[in-house]
Image (cartoon, rainbow, N blue to C red):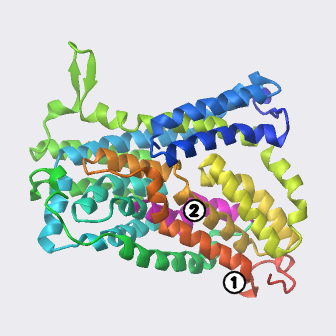
């Protein structure tokens, strides 16, 4: 069985046949996004059509089906789904116990203005994501709480979603414990401290640009009578529930497994809410046999994330076809003539990364898949440092993850916004222009590639002489 699962899946038309199902998926999702209907449940339909296209184009549909199932059943998919379900429960818990009302009350008491709240959110999120190295964990920890508070304080709602997502991928890019940082370093044959040290200049410049733009577009800074109406009566009682995100963040800081951290934090929140009189134990599970329905805090929390979970499950099945279909090998053969100089080679790798991130919406997978190609083309062929190559892999992927409307970070943040009770009178696609760190990071890397900034001897300190460039700076 294992040997069958590892066989190459052949497609009619070669590379075109392999990528056509992804084109079907992309066109369907972008149509939904541009029409303002970019909800995860709607994404199921183009994803299923893409799977059908893959089966029709495969020379052996049975092999293609096995590859799709293999992608769906990976450990990464199981971890994502479990984490999202637990996060949905915690989000419902925070909403039911009055933490949001407490934070709005506190913010109004100290006179915090909404215009600066996206900036505050971005800074807090950057610190959290850098310390923990998890983008999705940061969205999970901050999204359900800070979005409704920011909206109540007069912040621009799409900018609030964008600030949470951008902060998450800032740390994903530079955190030493981030899976993308580790993958980018080791696929290029270097170590994590070197890549972190050399990529700070790119990330911090992009973050500085983002901070300015978050203030400019963050909102008018005034709180209207309607902005906090969704929250009901404001009271400080729910502030005790801050212990729940505090425990989650503390466990994440300590490197505790995300599933463990979410489970313990949710359990603490339920016990604390009951003990403080903020939560009726009967509200955890409500079974109505007359209508044959199940509800309550726990089922509702899980149901709130079912949409994105099914989309991820189907999408990851398609993603498995890229590796099994020999996508990277075919790309390597067809891009040989675009790798004559360091500049053209870096630009080619950037284009490949953008395409692969669009196809997979999984930056770690992209870095692992494209890492050998980048090492061959950039490091071995053109003498570019392993650190520089790793930084291109990571920065381009992190920037792209902010800007793909069907990416898991933006989708999660949007779903948490929708379930928070605050107004969500905007489409997911309308948040993309405000993903300032994503745009800035890609812009900084493009400037670096075109000008050669950072591609010099200073970035080669401590590397093998055999890998150092021969005075090439462009």
Left or right side of 146 for 226: left
Residue appearing at x 27%, y 20% in the figure? 293
Q: Quadrant of the C terminus?
A: bottom right
Residue 203 place in picture, x, y as percent? 55, 74
> Which of these two is toward me, 5 or 218?
218
Residue 231 place in picture, x, y as percent? 17, 51
Q: Secondary structure at mark 2?
A: helix
Q: Is residue 344 magenta?
A: no
Residue appearing at x 68%, y 64% in the figure? 393
Residue appearing at x 82%, y 34% in the figure? 8
Q: Main secondary structure of the magenta part?
A: helix
Query: Which comes sooner in the sequence, label 1 or label 2?
Result: 2
Magenta residues (range) = 164-188
Q: Is residue 277 above or below residue 370?
A: above
Q: Which mark is residue 398?
A: 2
Residue 264 place in picture, x, y as percent? 32, 46
Q: Is residue 167 magenta?
A: yes
Residue named by callout 1: 453
Disc 2 residue crowd, few under 14, some 14–19, many 20+, Cα 10 Å: many
CA gap, disc 1 to disc 2? 20 Å
- State whether residue 28 appears in this view: yes
Q: Secondary structure at mark 1?
A: loop
> Which of these two is toward me, 209 or 324?
209
Residue appearing at x 55%, y 68% in the figure? 439
Q: Is residue 71 above or below residue 453?
A: above
Total marks shown come to 2
Q: Is residue 444 above or below residue 54?
A: below
Disc 1 residue crowd, few under 14, some 14–19, many 20+, Cα 10 Å: some
């Amino acid at each position: 069985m294992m040997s069958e699962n590892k066989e190459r899946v052949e497609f009619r038309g070669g590379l075109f046949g392999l990528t056509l199902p992804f084109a079907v998926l992309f066109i369907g999702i972008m149509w939904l996004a541009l029409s303002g209907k970019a909800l995860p449940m709607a994404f199921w339909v183009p994803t299923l059509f893409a799977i059908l296209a893959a089966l029709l184009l495969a020379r052996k549909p049975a092999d293609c089906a096995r590859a799709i199932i293999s992608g769906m059943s990976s450990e990464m998919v199981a971890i994502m789904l479990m984490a999202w379900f637990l996060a949905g429960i915690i989000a419902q818990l925070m909403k039911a116990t009055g933490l949001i009302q407490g934070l709005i009350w506190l913010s109004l008491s100290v006179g915090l203005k909404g215009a600066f709240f996206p900036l505050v959110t971005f800074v807090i999120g950057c610190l959290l994501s850098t310390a923990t190295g998890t983008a999705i964990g940061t969205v999970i920890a901050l999204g359900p709480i800070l979005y409704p508070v920011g909206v109540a304080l007069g912040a621009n709602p799409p900018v609030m979603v964008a600030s949470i997502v951008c902060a998450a991928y800032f740390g994903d890019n530079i955190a030493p414990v981030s899976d993308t940082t580790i993958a980018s370093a080791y696929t290029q044959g270097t170590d994590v401290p070197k890549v972190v040290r050399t990529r700070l200049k790119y990330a911090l410049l992009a973050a500085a640009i983002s901070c300015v733009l978050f203030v400019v577009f963050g909102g008018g800074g005034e709180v209207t009578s309607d902005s906090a109406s969704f929250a009901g009566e404001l009271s400080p009682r729910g502030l005790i529930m801050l212990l729940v995100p505090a425990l989650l963040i503390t466990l994440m800081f300590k490197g505790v497994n995300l599933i463990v951290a979410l489970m313990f934090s949710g359990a603490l929140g339920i016990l604390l809410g009951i003990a403080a009189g903020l939560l009726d134990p009967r509200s955890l599970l409500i079974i109505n046999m007359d209508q044959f329905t199940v509800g309550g805090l726990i089922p509702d929390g899980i149901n709130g994330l079912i949409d994105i979970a099914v989309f991820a499950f189907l999408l990851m099945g398609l993603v498995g076809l890229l590796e099994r279909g020999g996508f990277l090998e075919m790309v390597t053969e067809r891009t040989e003539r675009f790798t004559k100089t360091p500049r053209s080679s870096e630009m080619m790798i950037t284009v490949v990364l953008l395409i692969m991130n669009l196809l997979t919406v999984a930056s770690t997978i992209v870095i692992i898949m494209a890492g050998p190609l980048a090492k061959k083309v950039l490091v071995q062929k053109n003498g570019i440092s392993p650190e520089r190559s790793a930084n291109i892999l990571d920065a381009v992927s992190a920037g792209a993850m902010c800007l793909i409307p069907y990416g898991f970070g933006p989708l999660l943040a949007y779903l948490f916004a929708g379930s928070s009770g605050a107004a969500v009178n905007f489409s997911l696609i309308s948040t993309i222009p405000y993903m300032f760190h994503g745009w800035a990071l890609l812009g900084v890397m493009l400037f670096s590639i075109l000008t050669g900034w950072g591609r010099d001897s200073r970035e080669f300190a401590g590397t093998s002489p055999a890998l150092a460039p021969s005075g090439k700076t462009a």
